[in-house]
Each structure stands twice: as structure tokens, then as C-alpha cells.
Amino acid sequence: MQKTILVTGANGQLGKSLQQIAPDYDGQYRFLFTDVDTLDITDIAALRRIVTTEKVDILINAAAYTAVDKAESDIERAYLLNETAVANLATVAKENNAFFIHLSTDYVFDGKSSVPYRIGDPTGPTSVYGKSKLAGETAIVQSGCRGAVVRTAWLYSPYGNNFVKTMLRLADTKDSISVVSDQTGCPTLALDLARFLMAVIAHDGTANQLKYYHFTNKGRITWFDFASEIIRQAGKSCPVRPIPTSSYPTPATRPAFSVLDLNESEAIFAIPDWKESLTKVLPEIIYNYEHNIL
């Protein structure tokens, strides 16, 4: 029997990637893609209406407040989208026995580790963004709903604005690019994340508990390493220079180390290496960048 999946934040990088793979699941799942113009997730009554009317079986929350630096001064809005709206979704999922997948972040950790963060490691966010995302995780646990919290990091895709497109733009407009070399993590191709979420549904969709997963591509690199590989693969001649975080101050503190342990995710999904995924998608990103396609 075909199940209905409601996706929020459909116009974001992950939402558009889910739209890209949706045809692969024709007959198995019916997708309802919504964004702020069609569904206000801060309005629990509106959520209840759509979930009950459409008989939603699975909720994927790809909506969030992700302006990390702006969140430092826009605190109320960050918590509205990252905690209150998430609590609404979790509550409605619980009421309808729907499976709820929520996307969280490496920013829930303090960034002081030297080994990959495991799912049960203590959290300790240092920014408003990280604190608001952790508050969303807590709201899901308190709701008692079933589903999965998926923490991810360094998301990029052919869609919207992201680090890869920024590097391409800077390479075309600057004599050189300076990128921090003392923040370590791993990029995540949104398309790989989208396929992983479908694997989570296949693996856990009938389970009655809440599980946590960590998902990025495989590897451990710095932003400087990522930028250097983007420029190399794109065939650009612009030099990339390493700088310390202290030379690039931002309102929000970035985690110095945010590598996530992927053991649980690798048990249900073959995770590609970060460089392999970049190679696969870079031509499409370059095309969209050169033709100003968001």
C-alpha cells in the first residue's frame, strides 16, 4: 500500500534533492512537498489539517533557520523555527502515529573533540543556532513520537547558495581565496543525504521508537581542503590560501572539530567518500552557477 510522505522546506537544498529522487519511488510513496508559502509549520492547526486530511504516514522536516551568524541577533526567530515549529511537527506526528524524520546539525556539539562525535556523546552548543537546534531535538524526545533525528554538516548541492558556489564565484572574481584551515569536518552532498533518509524510512519506518543517526560523506578534511579540491576539479587557476579562524571572525562561533561518527548510518547505507560525491555533482553545480540557476 502506497504511503504518503510530507516534506517541509521543499525549496531548500535537501528539499530539492528529495524532489529530484521522488520519481524513483513512484508507486511506493506519494510525496507532498511544502514550503513556507504553502504550509506554516509554526501553525500547529494548519499542520494538523494537512496531516489528517492527506493521511500522512511520514514527515520529513527539511525546514530550519540556518543563518548561523544572523541567529546571534535574531534569537526569537531562530527558536521559533528550530524549536517551536519542530515541537509542532513532533506533536502532530505523535497524534497521527506518523514517522518523523528531523534534520539536525553538528553544531549541537562544542567542537572541542579530537575524535568523531558519537551519537551518545555529550552535547554543548556554543552558538544560538546550535542551541536552538538542540532545543528542537529535545522537543522531539519529549513528544514521544517515533522516527529519526539525523545530524548532518557542511551541506551542499546544485541548488541554492552554498560553499561550493561561493568558491566558484570567488575564483572568478578574486586574485586569491583565503579559507580557514583549522576547522575540521566533512561535507555532505544533499542528494546523498536524501537517499539516506529514504534508507532510514525503509529500515525504521515501522519502528515504534526514536533513533539518532549521524550522516555526512566519508572523510575528514578542513574547509581549506574542501575549497582547494573544488578549485582543482573546476579547473580554476585562482590560488587558495590557508588562514586561521582568528583571521576570519564571525558573530557565531564555528566548531573547530565536527567530524561525526557514521557507524550507525553505514550499517544501513553505503556512504560515498566526500571527494567521490563532489566529482559526481560538480559539473551540475558549475552549470547552475554559470547560468545563475538556484
Image: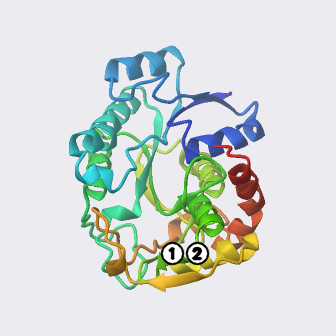
Q: Which residue is mark 1?
A: 223
Residue at (33% x, 44% y) in the render:
82
In-front residue for pair 18/255: 255
Q: Give the number of the disc on residue 226.
A: 2
Q: Is residue 222 visible?
A: no
Where 225 sits versus 272, above or below? Answer: below
Q: Which amino acid type corresponds to the residue marked 1 in the rendered image? A: Trp
- The colour scheme is rainbow
Where 84 sits versus 257, above or below? Answer: above
In-front residue for pair 76/89: 76
Image x and y of residue 128, in percent: 25, 55
Q: Secondary structure at mark 1?
A: helix
Residue at (28% x, 71% y) in the render:
110
Q: Is residue 75 visible?
A: yes
Answer left or right for 15 relative to 94.
right
Disc 1 crowd, CA 10 A, few/some/many (<14, 14-19, 20+): many
The answer to the question of whether label 1 and label 2 lie on touching residues, with beta carbons closer than 8 A, is yes
Where 190 sits versus 234, above or below? Answer: above
- In the picture, residue 83 is in which quadrant? top left
Q: How many angstroms separate mark 1 from mark 2 (CA)? A: 5 Å
In-front residue for pair 169/200: 169
Q: Which quadrant of the figure contains the C terminus? A: top right
Image x and y of residue 261, in percent: 47, 73
Q: Secondary structure at mark 2?
A: helix
